[in-house]
């Protein structure tokens, strides 16, 4: 898909990958950009940069996502591209509380489900559209510092796969963004285990997003080595688990 002339909604758009994607989509000639984020003040500034519409939005609430889509449709008449991008991370394993699990579940899984409910059927009725999910390399490989993040990012990948399977032949294009470390507000301490292959800028990730959208491929892998790690995982699962155990031991007590 070419972004020129398209109307796109982006969540988590006040900073990081979301902001970089908004700027990149604008440069590609998007006809309209509707940006959602909890940080209303910063969101307004980004919306002004791209001459778009900023809508304060908490993606852990289905009603907020519905309102975001409604604002987009009211302003531009349709949504051609939905980039479900907001995310959170907190360190922890079995000691993580239920509230942390629920927060991660809502933001990393249900936010995509709620967004798809709001836009997908309308997209395919018009002949097609594009739905992008920000997961993580952790959704393909896992992450040693955070059980809540690794598990729910797996869920994000699974939902993106299901959406592509169920709607791909009806004209919906689906891509799943799975980077390792990216220099955003979530990036600390050298990127932790996700930073073993270095960190990319949000702008580099946005460039890869546009490239993969043009090719209409499913996986967006700004760190190409992730593909080889996936192959290693499926080739010998036990050996891969052993390698991840070593990585866990190395980063236990470190920063994410």
Image: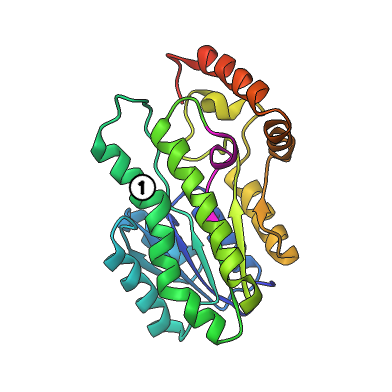
Question: Height in image: 107 above or below 94?
Answer: below
Q: Which segment is the magenta one?
A: 133-142
Q: Residue at x 71, y 59 (%)?
A: 212
- Residue 19 percent location from the top left of the image: 50, 55
Q: Residue at x 69, y 39 (%)?
A: 223
- Residue 20 percent location from the top left of the image: 55, 54
Its colouring scheme is rainbow
Q: Classify the position of the N terminus by image quarter.
A: bottom right
Q: Secondary structure at mark 1?
A: helix
> Residue 248: within the magenta?
no
- Residue 25 percent location from the top left of the image: 60, 65
Residue 4 in view, yes or no: no
Question: Height in image: 185 above or below 236?
Answer: below
- Residue 56 percent location from the top left of the image: 31, 62
| Depth check, front residue: 10 or 90 | 90
> Residue 136: within the magenta?
yes
Q: Residue at x 42, y 47 (%)?
A: 87
Residue 151 in view, yes or no: yes
Q: Residue at x 29, y 38 (%)?
A: 100
For disc 1, the neighbor class at 10 Å (few under 14, some 14 to 19, many from 20) is many
Reading the image, the residue beneath label 1 is 105
Residue 62 shown left or right of residue 217 in the figure: left
Residue 214 shown left or right of residue 176 in the figure: right
| Depth check, front residue: 35 or 64 | 64
| Depth check, front residue: 24 or 146 | 146
Label total for image:
1
């Amino acid at each position: 898909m070419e972004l020129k002339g398209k109307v796109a909604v982006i969540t988590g758009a006040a900073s990081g990958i979301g902001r970089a994607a908004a700027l990149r989509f604008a440069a590609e000639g998007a006809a309209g950009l509707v940006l959602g984020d909890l940080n209303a003040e910063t969101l307004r500034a980004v919306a002004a940069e791209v001459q778009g519409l900023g809508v304060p939005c908490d993606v852990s609430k289905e009603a907020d996502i519905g309102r975001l889509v409604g604002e987009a449709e009211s302003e531009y008449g349709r949504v051609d591209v939905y980039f479900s991008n907001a995310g959170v991370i907190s360190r922890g394993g079995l000691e993580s509380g239920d509230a942390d699990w629920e927060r991660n579940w809502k933001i990393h899984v249900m936010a995509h489900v709620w967004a798809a409910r709001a836009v997908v059927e309308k997209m395919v009725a018009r002949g097609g559209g594009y739905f992008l999910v920000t997961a993580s390399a952790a959704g393909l490989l896992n992450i040693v510092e955070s059980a809540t993040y690794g598990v729910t990012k797996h869920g994000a990948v699974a939902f993106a796969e299901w959406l592509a399977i169920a709607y791909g032949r009806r004209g919906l294009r689906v891509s799943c963004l799975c980077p390792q470390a990216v220099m955003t507000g979530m990036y600390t301490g050298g990127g932790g285990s996700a930073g073993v292959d270095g960190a990319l800028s949000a702008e580099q990730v946005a460039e890869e997003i546009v490239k993969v959208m043009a090719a209409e491929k499913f996986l967006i892998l700004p760190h190409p080595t992730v593909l080889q790690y996936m192959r290693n995982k499926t080739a010998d699962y036990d050996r891969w688990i052993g390698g991840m155990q070593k990585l866990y031991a190395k980063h236990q007590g470190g920063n994410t």
